[in-house]
Image: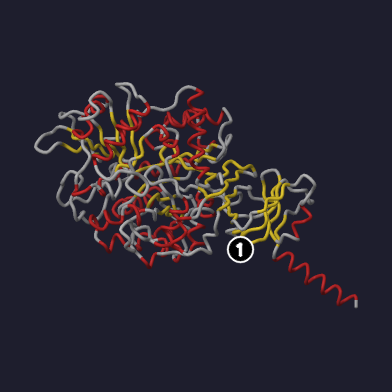
Amino acid sequence: MTLLLSRKVLALTSIVLMNFSFAASPVQFADTIYYGGDIVTVNDQQASAEALAVKDGVIVAVGERKALAQFKGHKTKMVNLRGQTLLPAFMDAHSHYINSLSVANQVNVYAPPAGPGTSPESIVAELKKFVKAHKIPKGVLIQAYGYDENVMPEGRQLNRDHLDAVFPDHPVLVNHVSMHGGVLNSAAMKKWKFTAEMQTPPGGVILRKPGTAEPYGLIMETAFLPVFADLPKPETDEEIIAATRAGQMMYARAGITTAHEGATHAADLKVMQKASKAGVNIIDVVAYPFITDLEEVLKDNPPESFGKYNQRLKLGGVKITIDGSPQGKTAYFTQPYLTGGPGGEENWTGEPTFPEEWVKKAVKQVYELNVPLNLHANGDAAIDLFLRAHEYAAVGDLSRDRRTTVIHSQFVRKDQMAKYAEYKIIPSLYTLHTFYFAEAHKANRGFEQASYLSPMRDAIDMGLHPSNHTDFVVAPLDQMFMLWSAVNRVSRAGEVYGADQRVTPLEALKAMTINVAFQYKEEASKGSLETGKLADLVILDQNPLKVAPMKIKDIRVMATIKEGKTIYQREK
């Protein structure tokens, strides 16, 4: 009888342990317990649960609701999900956070469905409405974001003349959707000293008016870097606090609790550090100082300070850019573009942003600092260049786990991914291009190469743990649309690009949660719903693992929770 009872107790204990993870410390009453909906943990050891308990911003239990009853005290808040879905909050694998501090004061000229930019005239009309609504004085810079020449009718491009006709007295900068350049009017050209006599710098693009040497509007890559570095930023404490709150709410509304600043200049870092010192951050921000500003950044931020949060801001590593954008035709390929270069160049393969020897030395410098490297590379020739730089800089220790991440890796070849796996390099992919830019890639690179864009299926099957990103403001902060793009790979025109590279909704979800946590060396505290991890959570109105794949993009973020505190609640 006693032996039989003992066996029953053991069996019951085993069932509880299988369905309930808990902290080893004595039970404390939870601040909050979530129940009444699907709980997707993104934890392969415990894929789902009935309830989740939070105490002091940390998950203290995940499991069956009945088992979690011991965590319920008289002050515990019981949150009934009412059929909605709880997941780990989304982690931004790559965007340009600093831009979120200013886009509230810029004009959205994305192409549909993200914006109204269907033609040069529609862009000018949006700018005109903005200036009138905001009563912007003459001489004050006007900015827009999201310009995509690939969707302009009949191959027409926005140029200086379009802007000058309406804005002779305002400097105007219409930022290219790639974020690697922009279209300037004459007043902006004068402001940043672009003239007919100016030589195009190596790795840069200055589009000239046909038949002349006059800059005609579009400035890209290294030619654009001085403009980018000189753009206005919030300066006073009040401006910085207001801009930070507005920018971080853009991420919170998208269900993101960890944001990425993907090319941090020294002046940008000072703005972010002022915000942190003021204690206004509601999300975590991971910043990657740009290689050209590294020496300036290191003066006040030694390498040993990297990787540590200070009031929700940390320096994650260093950023190097070695080519441009495929939709802007500045990405660097081994084979020429089918449509020529951005200025009509023949046999155009694109160019590296910096010479190879410079890149090799820069990669070696970062590796010797012993901080993670994020390296932007889109075209396969750029990825070849990086791999040679890695082999030069890491000779004798090629496979060390440095958390080196190749941002975009869009046109990576399968043989290059094998090197990623061998060298423990992380690909941060960009599946949103299968919707927004697939037609442009098809025209520029051909259907076969366009279909192998951001090959997430092969990356996973080769043992890699790819992340996925929006590259905001290149694409909107819309995590459900990003997940949808990885699962479906459907273009703006309704064509499927790379059906064999589709992934499951769970695999796509991992690429925006636990895989990003690994990229940031934060897998022990973020990315999945497990005991001891931060209570960074998101509530969705539907379960992306259960809805029809084409319906994933319609799922709405209902609430975002950072360390147990609700920072965004959707109005009903």
How many badges with numbers are in the image? 1
Q: Rate crowding at label 1 as few (under 14), some (14 to 19) or many (20 or more) other CA atoms within 10 Å.
A: few
373 or 328: which is nearer to us?
328
Q: Quadrant of residue 322?
A: top left
341 or 137: which is nearer to us?
137
Q: Position of residue 443 (x, y in %)?
A: 23, 56
Q: Position of residue 205 (x, y in %)?
A: 23, 39
Q: Quadrant of residue 56?
A: top right
Left or right, 14 with respect to 169, comes to: right
Q: Is residue 96 above or below residue 470?
A: above
Q: Amino acid at mark 1?
A: Ala
98 or 371: which is nearer to us?
98
Q: Residue furthest left?
A: 211
Q: Position of residue 114 (x, y in %)?
A: 37, 47
Question: Which image quarter is the N terminus in?
Answer: bottom right
Q: Position of residue 192 (x, y in %)?
A: 27, 27
Residue at image position (66%, 44%) is 57
Residue at image position (24%, 57%) is 445
What's the colour scheme? Answer: secondary structure
Give the labeled residue for mark 1: 47
392 or 217: which is nearer to us?
217
Q: Residue furthest front?
A: 572
- Is disc 1 placed on a helix, strand or loop? loop
Q: Is residue 48 above or below residue 182?
A: below
Left or right, 75 with respect to 183, comes to: right
